Image: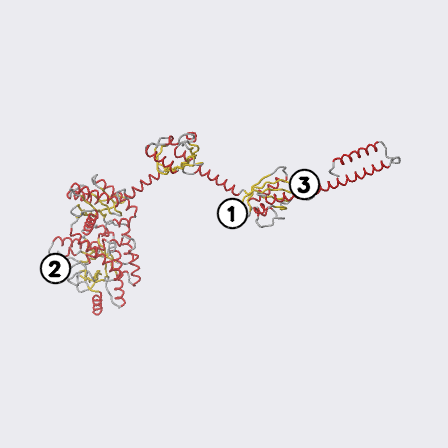
Amino acid sequence: MVNNPNNAFSSKALRDAAHHRLNQGLTDVSDWTGRDIQSLVSELELHQEELRIQNEELKQARDRLEIARENAQNCYRDLFERAPMGYLLLDAQGRIEEANQAANQLLAPGTDLSGQLLSAFVASESQDALHLHRRAIASATTTQAVDLTLARDEQATWTVRMESVMEPTTGLGGARFRCALIDITERRKTEDKLRVAARVFEEIGEAIVVMDAAGRIQSINEAFTAITGYTESDALGVIMSGLVRSERQGQVFHKKMWESLNNRGFWQGEIWDRRKDGEIYPEWLTINRIDDDGEPRNLVAVFSDISQIKNSQRKIEYLASHDALTGLPNRRLFQERAQEAIAQAQRRGGQAGLLFLDLDNFKDINDTLGHEVGDELLVRVAAQLREWVRDEDTVARFGGDEFTVVFTDCDAEKAGFIAQRLVAGLAGTFEVRGRHLRVTTSAGLALYPQDGEDVVSLCQAADMAVYRAKGDGRNRLRLYDTALHQQLLEDRAIEQALRRALTNGGLRLVYQPQFAASDPTRLVGVEALLRWQDPELETISPERFISIAERSDLITELGWRVQALLCTDLQQWLTAGLEPPVISFNVSPKAFRDGQFSSQLEEIMSQHGILPGQLQVEFTESTLAGHSDLVLDEIDKLHASGIELSIDDFGTGYSCLINLKRLPLAELKIDKSFVDGLGENEHDEAIARATLYMAEAFGLRTVAEGVETQQQLAWLQAHGCDRIQGFLLARPLEADDFRSMLQRAKRTS
């Protein structure tokens, strides 16, 4: 019935008729016929049915609307929860009323956010920004945005962008805010990287050039301008190779470079380019090709100016072959030059020579005046040597005070002449920093092919010759001969054995008595003398092993061993109640020049209970050569402590009478070389007589060494010598024998 259109039409007709009758006032049904009443009842029934159907349709429509509303709510909730960005609903105090999964994951994964303040999840550095944002959205009608750092993980930084808007007020609940959270952590990192990359591009010290596939410059950085001089207005749109190419490498080089770039996608190497001002300079260049879908899109060139590196390399190469102090060739370049000289002599059937030079006593200058003075002296010596040799010869420095000269195409006579001139030229005074330094040189010359057929053998030969020059008194030239080799081997064997003796024992002291010249039986003094007997080399003369020790670094250690042995013996004699006279001992010149002799001697004496008045220090005149302040200071300290001082071998060395006047001496010793001729040689007598007169004039005691005959003794007694020492009266005694002498002297006193 509801769906029948005819019924619908009948119902409409009845309604129309009913409306008409009502409008005509025809409501009186008294004259209605049964048919009329039946029709009206039918109409009313029809109208009632119509109302029922309409109610049913309205109910169905309401049900459909409710289902649609529920579906819409579910869809909204699903979208809200599953949205990729976070959504929050905040109350007026900033507490979270609603939060979707994305917001929960951003702020605090696994935590119920309901009722919590949003500020609790924001890092301290973003709290002010959040506060200002809330104030902004409370007074604005549009969406407001702010970037916040979350207080989520101490190990990593999380950043979100929050866009917020205020909901209209609907009641007493107050304002509410809807917020969208977008994770911009990666975007921020990318932006930071891009910002750093842009800054690096501009501020890096290397030039960066971006070109199109044809090589036209699209962009440059500041380093490009700094290196080449070209600005953006000069470079943009220009083919790079036409802008900076120097043509120094040529077409073949550039062709290979582009072949590598085309085939491999990159090229790297050293290249010479041209600056804007025309200067040619070296650079280290790397070019990479950037492809897009297999097609070249851009070329990126990165290069740096390596001019300083090149200069440093040249300097390093120079220093690798030259001495940094003097600028002379060093050992490495010397070897090459010497080999070249020998090769040339071989080709021409000629000769070559090697000259070794050592500055005498250079260590003393370093020790007393300092290395700066020593270095300046070496520079001055190097300059003189360069000036005095021929252009074709090579002057080199091995280190320390060792210089060498390579003589090219030079026979023995010519090489010897030049070498002698060098030794004589260096034997003089150099003024360094206001000081006049007296310099001498010991030199050794070896010739190819007679003294050696290669560099090594010639160096060994020249070194042996230097060794001989030093042993012969220094300040001289010696040529190599075969006998030197055997002597050098023996000396080195003695040196090694002496080192063992200092470690393992074998050194001892003997004591040679000194007697009054007026009464040759009265003991007035004694000199301690060092002796050494090696198990393999047997007895070695003091002159031999002390000379070797002086040339090496052993003499100072040997001196301390003498003092220790002397103080030990003296302590034993004093403990036994004996009364030995003052005992003298010799000290090497080197001992005075380290500035520690007096203090170390005082320490040894203190350890053994020896008083200063029981010892006397003897030193030779060579100790005073140069009379440095350090040596004089040590002598003054010894005198001030109560130790007597004696000059040994007076007249045989560098004599300076002023020293007799100003030094606090107690004694002069006349050397055996002058005593030998007394009574027979008028020259020896004249020297001895003059020495005795000078000593008397200065109030010094005199001791004659090496007295072996009655004739010598008589002469010395007649001319006023104070003390006698020599085989005539007593040979050097072993410690036990001298102890016995002291015991006999005690019993007879």
**Residue 443, horizontal then vertical, whole percent:** 20, 47
Question: Is 265 on the left-hand or right-hand side of 111?
Answer: left
Q: Amino acid at mark 2?
A: Gln
Report crowding for label 1: few under 14, some 14 to 19, many 20 or more residues within 10 A (C-alpha): few
Outermost residue, right direction?
30
**N-terminal of the two: label 2 or label 1?**
1
Residue identified by numbered label 2 = 711
Q: Amino acid at mark 1?
A: Ala
Question: What's the CA distance linking mark 2 and mark 1?
Answer: 107 Å
Residue bearing mark 1: 156
Name the residue carrying label 3: 169
Of the residues shown, which amino acid type is indicated by label 3? Thr
Label 3 packing within 10 angstroms: few (<14), some (14-19), many (20+)? few
Q: Is residue 569 above or below residue 449?
A: below
Element class at badge 1: loop
Quadrant of the image occupied by residue 634 = bottom left
